[in-house]
Amino acid sequence: CFVGVSQRCHASFCRWGRGLGLVEPVLGKDSALNVPNGAIGVVFYLLQGLLGTHGSRLASVTLLATSVASAVASLWLGAVLLFGLRDLCVLCVSSYGLNLALLGLNLHQHRRSRAATEKK
């Protein structure tokens, strides 16, 4: 969040920028699962890009499952940003919107894939 936003938006990355802000209180700061949210995002978007070109049922299910997880994480982080931090981060909200759009696309593709399988 670097474009005309408050310092609180940048500060939010300290607590909520790793493990969705949920891992550290449960497993500790040094847990291997307490990775930066950005790293989770890179893996997610790589999966979306690589598997999005495959028409297999497994790819379709994986895309849908990871999109659901991403949408839940986006809703969680959006709620933290809006209600907890009472702030607005344009970059954050844009990524949440992208994740929800990917969910819609993957749901549509999954339904098409399932319908094509049932016709056979």
Image (cartoon, rainbow, N blue to C red):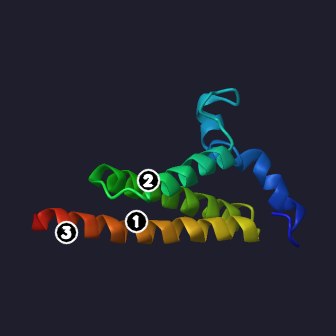
Neighbours of disc 2 within 10 Å: few (<14), some (14-19), many (20+): some
* Mark 3: secondary structure: helix
* Mark 1: secondary structure: helix
Q: In which quarter of the image is the C terminus?
A: bottom left
- Give the foreground label among 1 and 2: 2
Q: Which amino acid does label 1 sit on?
A: Asn
Residue drawn 31% across the image and 64% down it: 110
Q: Quadrant of the N terminus?
A: bottom right
Q: In the displayed structure, would residue 3 be above or below residue 72?
A: below
The mark that comes first in sequence, 3 or 2, is: 2
* Residue 31: percent from left, percent from top: 64, 27
* Residue 10: percent from left, percent from top: 83, 57
Which numbered marker is on residue 51? 2
Q: Which amino acid does label 2 sit on?
A: Leu
Neighbours of disc 3 within 10 Å: few (<14), some (14-19), many (20+): few
The mark that comes first in sequence, 1 or 2, is: 2
* Residue 92: percent from left, percent from top: 70, 64
Residue drawn 51% across the image and 68% down it: 100
Which residue in the protein does label 3 denote?
115
Horizontally, residue 82 falls left or right of residue 47, namely right
Residue drawn 60% across the image and 43% down it: 22
CA–CA distance between discs 1 and 2?
Answer: 11 Å
Cβ atoms under marks 3 and 2 closer than 8 Å:
no
Neighbours of disc 1 within 10 Å: few (<14), some (14-19), many (20+): many
Q: In the displayed structure, would residue 40 be above or below residue 77?
A: above
Which numbered marker is on residue 84? none
Q: Which amino acid does label 3 sit on?
A: Ala
CA–CA distance between discs 3 and 2?
Answer: 19 Å
Which residue in the protein does label 1 denote?
106
Horizontally, residue 28 falls left or right of residue 86, namely left
Name the one closer to the observer, 99 or 60.
60
Horizontally, residue 27 falls left or right of residue 103, namely right
